[in-house]
């Protein structure tokens, strides 16, 4: 079973990595993809009451000044409960560093204010691809979503927590396009890179926890691993 899961991981991880490399090369070549402008304008044309404030709050949570303290606070809270999980959550910050490095390599400009509406107070001076907000949300909140499989024992509470975390991961991508600071393809690149780290973290987490209970330092059996998704 472990060999089968290992092969599945290799295939899935390889596809994610290859997709991200090809997507990144394309983003380096073109300032925007076909359909980016049309999709951005369509999304910005949808303005239900409360949409802008909600997406601004979600987007603000992804800023370094707020995201880093949240990671540190949650990790510190888990440190006294499940030390190993706390350390793994801190590791998700590696994804943020890599995202900033990729931005510099790809050097794709932000959406032009003459093409889309850029929300007041948001800068378009830095590079655009990939969306670092999306990378952070997928890596950190996605890993919390996974850990909730056993950190939250009550089934109903676990469903609520996972719905909340899943909504954050989805809506942050919407918010970055809606506020005019990213093209949809920047967001897709963010999901791909975040997915690479999330997949790797989950694989290594389970590989390092076989033979013991989750969060206690050694390894989770296949049954334990499967229970994370229940």
Image (cartoon, rainbow, N blue to C red):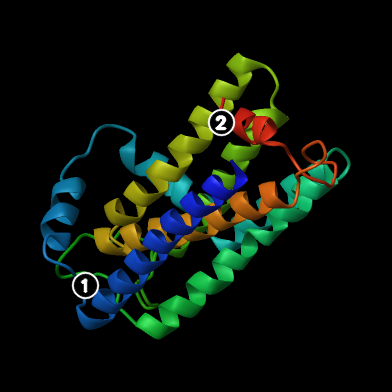
Closer to us: 131 or 2: 2
Residue visible at 60% across and 32% down? 226
Q: Nearer the viewer, mark 1 or mark 2?
A: 2
The residue shown at (54%, 59%) is 197
Which quadrant does the N terminus fall into?
Answer: top right
Q: Which residue is mark 1?
A: 112
Relative to 156, residue 17 above or below: below
10 Å crowding of disc 1: few (<14), some (14-19), many (20+) = some
Q: Is residue 90 visible?
A: yes
Taking 114 as reference, is 7 above or below it? Answer: above
Query: Where residue 126 sits: x, y (%)?
Result: 40, 77
- Crowd around label 2: few <14 · some 14–19 · many ≥20 (10 Å): few
For this view, does 202 lie left or right of residue 51? right
Decide which of 197, 205 is in the foreground and name it.
205
Q: Name which residue lies at 42% across and 57% down.
A: 11
Disc 1 versus disc 2: distance between alpha carbons?
Answer: 41 Å
Q: Residue furthest right?
A: 80
The first of marks 1 and 2 along the sequence is 1
Q: Position of residue 155 (x, y in %)?
A: 62, 16
Instruction: Establish if 178 lies above or below 220.
Output: below
Q: Is residue 34 left or right of residue 101?
A: left
Question: Which residue carries the number 2 mark?
Answer: 229
């Amino acid at each position: 079973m472990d060999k089968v899961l290992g092969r599945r991981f290799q295939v899935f991880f390889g596809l994610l990595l290859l997709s991200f490399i090809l997507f990144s090369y394309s983003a380096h070549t073109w300032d925007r993809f076909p359909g980016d402008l049309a999709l951005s304008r369509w999304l910005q044309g949808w303005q239900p009451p409360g949409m802008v404030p909600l997406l601004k709050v979600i987007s603000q949570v992804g800023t370094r000044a707020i995201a880093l303290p949240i990671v540190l606070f949650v990790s510190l809270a888990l440190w006294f409960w499940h030390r190993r999980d706390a350390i793994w959550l801190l590791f998700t910050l590696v994804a943020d560093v890599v995202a900033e490095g990729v931005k510099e390599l790809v050097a794709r400009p932000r959406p032009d204010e003459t093409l889309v509406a850029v929300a007041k107070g948001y800068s378009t001076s830095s590079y655009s691809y990939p969306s670092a907000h999306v990378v952070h949300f997928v890596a950190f909140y996605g890993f919390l979503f996974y850990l909730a499989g056993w950190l939250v024992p009550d089934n109903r509470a676990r469903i609520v927590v996972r719905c909340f975390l899943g909504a954050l991961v989805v809506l942050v991508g919407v918010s970055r396009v809606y506020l005019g600071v990213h093209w949809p393809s920047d967001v897709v690149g963010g999901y791909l890179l975040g997915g690479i780290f999330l997949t790797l973290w989950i694989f290594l987490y389970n590989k390092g926890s076989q033979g013991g209970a989750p969060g206690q330092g050694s390894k989770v059996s296949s049954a334990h691993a499967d229970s994370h998704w229940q």
